[in-house]
Image: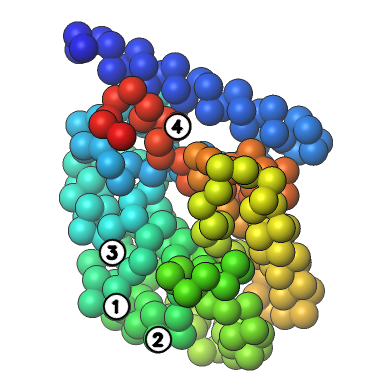
Amino acid sequence: MTPAEPLSRLQANIDSVRRRIAAACDRVGRSTAEVTLVAVTKYVSADLAAHLPRLGIHDLGESRPQELWHKAKAIPHARWHLVGHLQRNKVEATLPLACLIHSVDSERLLVELQRAADKLAITVAILLEINVSGESAKHGFAPAEVPPLLPQFPDRFPRLRMQGLMTMAPISDEPERVRPVFRDLRRLRDEWARQFPALGPLPHLSMGMTQDFEVAIEEGATLVRIGSALFEGLVQP
């Protein structure tokens, strides 16, 4: 490709994804302003990812903490999201760089996040990752594990600002098959927000990736984590 070609292809991919987001919103009477596109840069270089803010994509996501550290330094003007598993020994280095931790998947991680945030004197925006599908290979709280934590959450974790929930749906070529997973996450969010008003409104649902984000939006997603649809034709599959 000539230097201009990757940029042109990336812009075309972004436009296509945005049209798909708008169509999904229109089908259920939502505004596109309710949905944030988080561009997951897991498989692309920092040089390629650096074009995203120039093309209007300011929310970037990484699955691996070390890669987030590297890319956040290279692209400091983006809003960085950690969307993959966060090991406790990587918490302190990650918190100053991430605007939102999507993947808080255990009570032990909550304790470490609170400890590190207290040490750094910062507040941290988080989502609880819920293993709605119950797959053993996935990280996340089982739904039944969460309600006992919530009454004590504001007092026990004062540095953490719980913004909502995240889930990973099963991989499927048929998006309709995973719709119940997204519907259940929304139901859990709504139920817990009603039961535990001290938590605040819990505005966010992080759900949906390239293969199923349109169904996720129809079921209430506010953050969609999209990688391959944005970088199609720019990286090797």
Is residue 188 visible in the rendered structure shown here? yes
Residue bearing mark 3: 94
What is the C-alpha distance between the residues marked 4 and 3? 26 Å
Q: Residues within 10 Å of mark 2 (few under 14, many from 20)?
A: few
Q: Residue visible at 50% across and 39% down?
A: 210
Relative image position of residue 43 (x, y in whole percent): 28, 41
User: What amino acid is labelled 3 in the image?
Assistant: Thr
Question: Is the C-beta separation of discs 1 and 2 under 8 Å?
Answer: yes
Amino acid type, label 2: Arg
Q: Is residue 120 visible?
A: no
Mark 3 vs mark 2: which is more N-terminal? 3
Q: Is residue 235 left or right of residue 150?
A: left
Q: Residue 142, position in %: x, y? A: 57, 79
Write down the residue under mark 1. Answer: 88
Q: Answer with mark 1 or mark 3, whichever residue precedes in sequence.
A: 1
For marks 1 and 4, the one nearer the N-term is 1
Q: What's the CA distance linking mark 4 and mark 2?
A: 34 Å
Please report contact status of discs 3 and 2: CB closer than 8 Å, yes or no. no
Kindly identify the residue that appears in the image at 39 percent across and 80 percent down.
109
Drawn side of residue 37 relative to residue 94, left or right: right
Q: Specify the quadrant of the image occupied by residue 175.
A: top right
Q: CA distance from mark 3 to mark 2?
A: 16 Å
Q: Nearer the viewer, residue 93 or 224?
A: 224
The answer to which of marks 1 and 2 sits earlier in the sequence is: 1
The disc at residue 108 is 2
- Amino acid tagged 4: Ala
The spot of residue 76 in percent (x, y) is 27, 43
Q: Residue at x 43, y 70 (%)?
A: 137
